Image: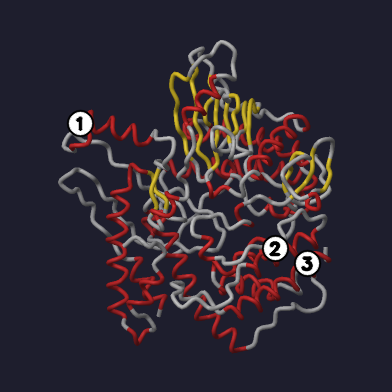
């Protein structure tokens, strides 16, 4: 039944609309592409509408000045909006601190400077960055973390020490940290990192202008930089800190002179994400450091268990969430399976403005941690990723590629092969991991987010592992052995899960949004209107199919991935 709803929704096409204010709404192409948990998506096609003279906003200099002032506001998140939990997401990134004092602190870094002449604000998912230009011509980059970045003090301390350690041990072109504070009670009123400005140009912005040879050469240099980092050895899994970091002594593993390894500071282990405190009621105390894979695995399982609520939520909007007992049983199956597996055995990179294949600066080391090699192998960097091929059910006309598209596919393939060859041939620690079947380590990636993702997601991973258990040469039989009743229940839940995933993937691709519904300001109005049109068509399809087919308007509404309507 849900397959019919999904098929009907895949046929919806919204006409290109040009309202009286000149804002354009893009066309929905047909076809919802298939999705699998963790799969990367291709670049969406939506672009912001060009300004027109008919729009009052474009012809009003006062309005433009007001918008510029808003987007440069140091305290508010202003780069984009969210189709899901918009107000909560923006509030989670709002900051309170003394910006004037931050400017004064920056001005004192370089001799001969007395004040800040101007600044540019840039925002990411976790940070707010200010590029200050001083009155002596020098530039300083000041970064402040938002509450969703991770635990206070630890996140800043770990980033600073990671930069210091890598600069001294790996000879990486990382801008020097000039001044920092991990104490939010400092006079500025917020933790900060002040760094020298990276020379060069943003690779992410200039990548489209580069040719295939430049892409390949740049990919080669970046991949070889990974070889340098992989040569470093560590005694445990966790995050790097200074030896005097504000961490309990029992949670520090001494390492090298002046350094230690302590708990993970990733927001994944601290429930720092917007709304996560409502999803996850408990907080796991076992966040590392972990001396071996067995301890690492136990930490993931403990995190998963800590996130299960004491009582089943009465107002849960996710129809395939599953019961608390289901999750507990699945997590236990993950634990047993992972123990056997253990026993068995292009962004934030800066280029030279003259030579775009020469990497001159690697920035943003926040959340960098020490993990097993197979965790890194699972994800390919942006600069070496292959594009998603889209729906297998696409029309022949959609399959036909233009010359530009074929050139792009060749470019991506060359970069991917370059990265793959270097990882397998030049990086010993990654070589063994790249040869592992992905089924080996998928449980390690997803076991600790089962409550957020829903029971069918992790159950399918267990079923995949079970089906390949003998083929992979694993000893005995798979610990996960579901009965017919559970398999029947899973089939229904997984159909709902896949429907929502496909719908979400299709929407994010067509609306140029992130998986969390984020869209840039320039297309916010267009994305809202397109989302409303798609939702209306989705609900109409559900009504026509009717309850007899297993779909109700209430269920269809709960399957919609965004709260914007």
Numbered disc 1: secondary structure: loop
2 vs 3, front mark: 2
CB under 8 Å between discs 2 and 3: no
356 left or right of 420?
A: left
Quadrant housing residue 556 = bottom left
Query: Which of the image's four quarters has the N terminus?
Result: bottom left
303 over 246 or under it: above or below: below
Where 499 sits versus 28, above or below? below
Q: Which residue is mark 2?
A: 300
- C-alpha distance separating marks 1 and 3: 64 Å
60 w.r.t. 338: above or below: above
Res 183 → quadrant = top right
Q: Which residue is at 57% across, 19% downward?
A: 108
Q: Earlier in the sequence, mark 2 or mark 3?
A: 2
Q: Is residue 76 above or below residue 11?
A: above
Give how far across and how far down residue 542 sits, in percent. Answer: 32, 76
Kindly check if marks 1 and 2 are in contact, taking CB atoms under 8 A apart as contact.
Answer: no
Question: Label 1 vs label 2: CA separation?
Answer: 54 Å
Q: Position of residue 254 (x, y in %)?
A: 84, 44
Distance, label 2 to label 3, CA atoms, is: 14 Å
Q: Is residue 23 left or right of 286 when viewed as pictured?
A: left
Residue at the top extreme? 112
Question: What numbered label is drawn on residue 60?
Answer: 1
Nearest to the observer: residue 562 or residue 77: 77
Task: Mark 1: give few (<14), some (14-19) or many (20+) Cα within 10 Å.
Answer: few
- At mark 2, the secondary structure is helix
Reading the image, the residue beneath label 3 is 341
Disc 3 crowd, CA 10 A, few/some/many (<14, 14-19, 20+) = some
């Amino acid at each position: 039944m849900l397959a019919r709803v999904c098929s009907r929704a895949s046929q919806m096409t919204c006409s290109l609309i040009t309202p009286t204010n000149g804002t354009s709404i893009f066309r929905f192409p047909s076809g919802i592409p298939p999705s699998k948990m963790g799969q990367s998506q291709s670049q969406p096609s939506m672009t912001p509408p060009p300004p027109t003279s008919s729009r009052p906003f474009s012809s009003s200099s006062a309005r433009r000045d007001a918008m510029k002032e808003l987007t440069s506001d140091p305290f508010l998140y202003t780069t984009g909006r969210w189709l899901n939990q918009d107000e909560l997401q923006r509030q989670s990134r709002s900051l309170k601190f003394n910006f004037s004092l931050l400017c004064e602190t920056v001005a004192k870094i370089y001799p001969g400077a007395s004040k800040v002449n101007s600044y540019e604000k840039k925002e990411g998912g976790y940070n707010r960055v200010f590029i200050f230009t001083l009155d002596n011509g020098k530039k300083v980059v000041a970064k402040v973390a938002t509450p969703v970045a991770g635990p206070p003090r630890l996140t800043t301390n770990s980033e600073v020490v990671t930069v210091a350690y890598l600069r001294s041990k790996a000879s990486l072109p990382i801008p020097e940290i000039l001044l920092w504070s991990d104490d939010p009670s400092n006079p500025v009123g917020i933790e900060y990192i002040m760094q020298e400005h990276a020379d060069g140009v943003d690779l992410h912005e200039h990548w489209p202008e580069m040719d295939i040879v430049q892409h390949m050469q740049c990919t080669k240099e970046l991949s070889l930089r990974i070889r340098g980092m992989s040569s470093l050895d560590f005694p445990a899994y966790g995050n790097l800190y200074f030896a005097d970091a504000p961490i309990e002594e029992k949670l520090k593993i001494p390492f090298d002179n002046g350094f230690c390894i302590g708990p993970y500071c990733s927001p994944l282990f601290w429930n720092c994400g917007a709304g996560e405190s409502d999803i996850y009621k408990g907080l796991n105390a076992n966040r590392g450091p972990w001396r071996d894979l067995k301890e690492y695995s136990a930490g993931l399982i403990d995190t998963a268990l800590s996130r299960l609520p004491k009582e089943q939520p009465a107002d849960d909007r996710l129809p395939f969430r599953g019961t608390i007992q289901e999750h507990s049983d699945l997590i236990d199956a993950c634990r047993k399976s992972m123990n056997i597996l253990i026993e068995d055995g292009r962004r934030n990179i800066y280029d030279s403005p003259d030579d775009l294949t020469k990497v001159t600066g690697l920035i943003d080391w926040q959340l960098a941690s020490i993990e097993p090699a197979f965790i890194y192998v699972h994800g390919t960097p942006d600069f070496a990723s292959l594009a998603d091929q889209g729906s297998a059910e696409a029309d022949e006309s959609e399959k036909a590629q233009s010359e530009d598209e074929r050139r792009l596919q060749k470019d991506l393939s060359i970069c991917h092969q370059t990265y793959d060859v270097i990882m397998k041939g030049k990086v010993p620690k990654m070589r063994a991991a790249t040869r592992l079947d992905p089924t080996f380590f998928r449980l390690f990636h997803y076991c600790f987010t089962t409550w957020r993702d829903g029971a069918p997601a992790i159950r399918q991973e267990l079923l995949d592992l079970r089906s390949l258990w003998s083929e992979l040469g694993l000893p005995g039989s798979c610990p996960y052995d579901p009965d017919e009743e559970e398999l029947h229940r899973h089939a229904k839940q997984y159909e709902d899960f896949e429907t929502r995933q496909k719908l979400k993937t299709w929407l994010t691709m067509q609306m140029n949004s992130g998986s969390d519904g984020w869209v840039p300001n320039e297309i916010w109005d267009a994305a809202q209107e397109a989302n409303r049109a798609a939702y209306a068509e989705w609900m109409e399809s559900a009504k026509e199919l009717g309850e007899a087919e297993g779909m109700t308007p209430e269920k269809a509404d709960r399957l919609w991935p965004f709260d914007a309507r």
